[in-house]
Amino acid sequence: MAGGWSRDGAVQEQIDASVEDAVALARSHLSEGESFTHCEECGCAIPEKRRKAIPGIHLCISCQEKIEQQEISSTGINRRGSKDSQLR
């Protein structure tokens, strides 16, 4: 059921497009090729199990976690223009 000027199924199409974009983004972050034996950032040895599990890995676990934390903290949601923020 669509409301207003949107056609039937428009909401589901938007959800599907968002999921496809998220999957494409996740795939773009995957490494390819030969794994490094030592971390590109700190120089620590990367365990063989990690190199086999994730082909093309360049970072040790601790450096990878630091980068992921920076990405999470920098991607906030802008709610200034949202309907909920205008109602408060």
Image (cartoon, rainbow, N blue to C red):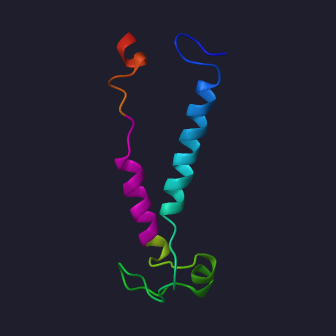
Residue 29 picture location, percent across and down? 48, 63
Q: Residue 27 occupies which quadrant of the picture?
A: bottom right
For the N terminus, give its image quadrant: top right
Q: Residue at x 62, y 16 (%)?
A: 2
Q: Is 67 colored magenta in this rendering?
A: yes
Residue 48 horizontal side relative to residue 36, left or right? right
Number of numbered labels in the structure image: 0
Q: Is 16 colored magenta in this rendering?
A: no
Q: Is residue 88 visible?
A: no
For the C terminus, give its image quadrant: top left
Which of these two is toward me, 7 or 55? Answer: 7
Q: Residue at x 38, y 40 (%)?
A: 76
Residue 73 picture location, percent across and down? 38, 49
Q: Residue at x 52, y 76 (%)?
A: 32
Magenta-drawn stretch, dominant element (helix, strand or loop): helix
Answer above or below: position of 48 versus 32. Answer: below
Residue 13 picture location, percent across and down? 60, 32
Q: Residue furthest left?
A: 80
Q: Residue 82 occupies which quadrant of the picture?
A: top left
Q: Is residue 31 visible?
A: yes
Which range of residues does the magenta coloring cover? 63-77
Residue 83 picture location, percent across and down? 41, 16
Q: Residue at x 53, y 48 (%)?
A: 22
